[in-house]
Amino acid sequence: MKVRVVGSGSMWTAYNSASYLIDDSIIIDFPNGMCKYLFRQGIDPRAINNVIITHFHGDHYFDIPFYYLLKSRSDNKAINLYCGKEGKRKINKLFALAFPNSVKRVKESIDLKYHFNKKFKIDNYEISRVLMDHGRMKPAYGYILADDKIKVGFTGDTTLCDNVKYLASMCDYLFCDCMFIEGTSKHMGIDMLKKLSSKYKNCTFVVSHLEDDTRYKLNKLDYNNVIVPEDGVTITIM
Ligand SMILES: [Zn+2]
Ligand SMILES: [Zn+2]
């Protein structure tokens, strides 16, 4: 599996917001600016047909209208959108707000399918959705992508809850929220990461959604199973 960290920052930084591209085929989260992030990294969003959304905060889905519009103007019109069942209504509302005069044309033009199942398959990966704890934002999901060799987890936004421990216990790599120096009831922090990474030594933690002071501090620490990625790096997991 090839995971490109398209964005590793929180929304209040010059870094792109947390988002990933897997095997040039699957996007996890679609923050405001995502189409531009991808173009700047030499990736054409039109070529991508699968999008997984962790939860419906703006920094995780607000660029979806731009993606639908772009797909409607391309030859590749297939879109599979995997999310909680509230997603369709939220995205429709956002699209109508963003491009009110194009809603009908775009909807007729693209080949859009929503998928609300807890378990699904994309390419060679069996994917399962797991409930996270992101304070009042409910539901917030994490995902596990597994093939016959590896298991890779993505927490999305979350505090340290039992399901984060579950992901850490079973995954080879876990792309996880580590927004703050000290975690809160909504986001994990370095204090929580420290506990996790020392308990689950077989898991490599790739931190994301970072505030600048958190990144600065993380870069000075030397945990051997923690990676602090820059935007645009690709991590190959075998
Ligand atoms: Zn959030
Ligand atoms: Zn967020």
Image (tube, rainbow, N blue to C red):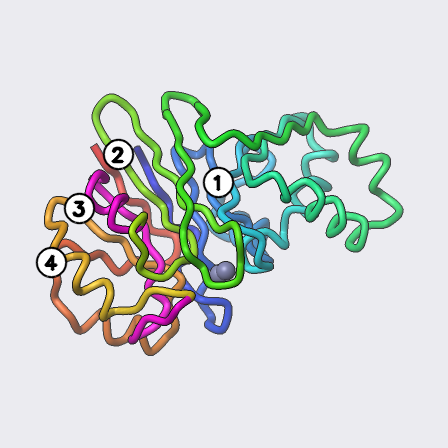
The x, y position of residue 13, in whole percent, is 46, 72
Cα distance between the residues tagged 4 and 3: 10 Å
User: If you read the primary sequence from the N terminus, does the residue marked by circle 3 or circle 1 appear first?
Assistant: 1
Cα distance between the residues tagged 2 and 1: 17 Å
Amino acid under label 3?
Cys
Q: Secondary structure at mark 1?
A: strand
Amino acid under label 4?
Ser
Residue 158 lies left or right of residue 80; in this view the side is: left
Which residue is disc 1 drawn over? 27
Q: Is mark 4 within 8 Å of ligand 2?
A: no
User: If you read the primary sequence from the N terminus, does the residue marked by circle 2 or circle 4 appear first?
Assistant: 2
Above or below, 86 against 115 in this view is below
Q: Is mark 3 within 8 Å of ligand 2?
A: no
* Res. 214 image quadrant: bottom left
Between 237 and 167, the one lying in front of the other is 167
Which mark is drawn over residue 203? Answer: 3
> Is 175 covered by the magenta stretch?
yes
Residue range (magenta): 164-185
User: If you read the primary sequence from the N terminus, does the residue marked by circle 2 or circle 3 appear first?
Assistant: 2
Badge 3 crowding class, 10 Å Cα cut-off, few under 14, some 14 to 19, many 20 or more, is many
Q: Quadrant of the image for the N terminus?
A: top left
Q: Quadrant of the image for the C terminus?
A: top left
User: If you read the primary sequence from the N terminus, does the residue marked by circle 1 or circle 4 appear first?
Assistant: 1
